[in-house]
Image (tube, helix red, strand yellow):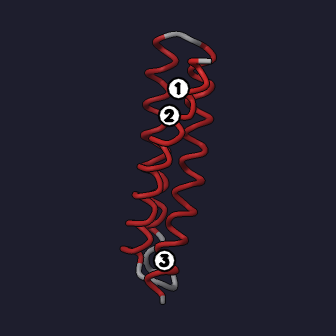
Amino acid sequence: MKIALAVLVGILWGALAALINMAINRNALAKGNTNALLAANLGRTAVDLAALGVVFLLRKVLPFPYEAMMLGTAISLSLLTVLFAFRMAGKGKK
């Protein structure tokens, strides 16, 4: 049960980071230049590293296995970032 809770918390934590990544992407696309997109890629990478780093640094404090939370965070970051990218690309076609 602790592992399932850790994965769920990780998924929620990764979803929050993915939402921040989406906001960074939107701002860069609104600016519409190459430098903004390069800065957005750097920013998104920093958010991903921070989200995973926080889980790692809090591993002694977390009441459940941090490995499971790390896995849930990584899965959520990966899937939601792709989902948000497809969603934003679909809005651009209309």
Q: Secondary structure at mark 3?
A: helix
- Whether residue 27 is visible here, answered yes or no, is yes
Q: Provide the secondary structure element on which disc 1 rests.
A: helix
x and y percent of residue 87 in the render? 56, 34
Residue farthest to the front?
A: 94
**Nearer mark to the viewer, of 3 and 1:** 1
Q: Position of residue 61 (x, y in %)?
A: 51, 80
Near mark 2 (Cα within 10 A), the count class, few <14, some 14-19 or many ≥20, is: some
Indicate the secondary structure of the residue bearing disc 2: helix
The quarter of the picture where the C terminus appears is top right
Residue linked to disc 3: 6
Q: In the rendering, at what x and y percent does residue 35 appear?
A: 47, 14
Q: Nearer the viewer, mark 2 or mark 3?
A: 2
Q: Are marks 2 and 1 in contact (CB under 8 Å)?
A: yes
According to the picture, the residue beneath numbered tag 2 turns out to be 85
Instruction: Tell me the distance, in whole angstroms, between the alpha carbons under discs 3 and 1.
Output: 32 Å
Mark-to-mark CA distance, 2 and 1: 6 Å
**Amino acid type at image mark 2:** Ala
Residue type, mark 1 in image: Ala
Residue at x 44% of width, y 71% of height:
69
Return the disc, 2 or 3, that comes first in the chain's sequence.
3
- Between 2 and 57, the residue placed more toward the observer is 2
Residue 93: quadrant of the picture:
top right
The amino acid sitting under disc 3 is Ala
Q: Residue furthest bottom?
A: 1
In this rendering, is residue 44 above or below 62? above
Q: Which residue is mark 1?
A: 89
Q: Is residue 16 above or below residue 37?
A: below
Residue 79, numbered label = none
Percent across and percent down for residue 42 are 43, 31
Give how far apart the Cα atoms at labels 2 and 3 are: 26 Å
Which residue is drawn at the image coordinates 61% and 27% (left, top)?
26
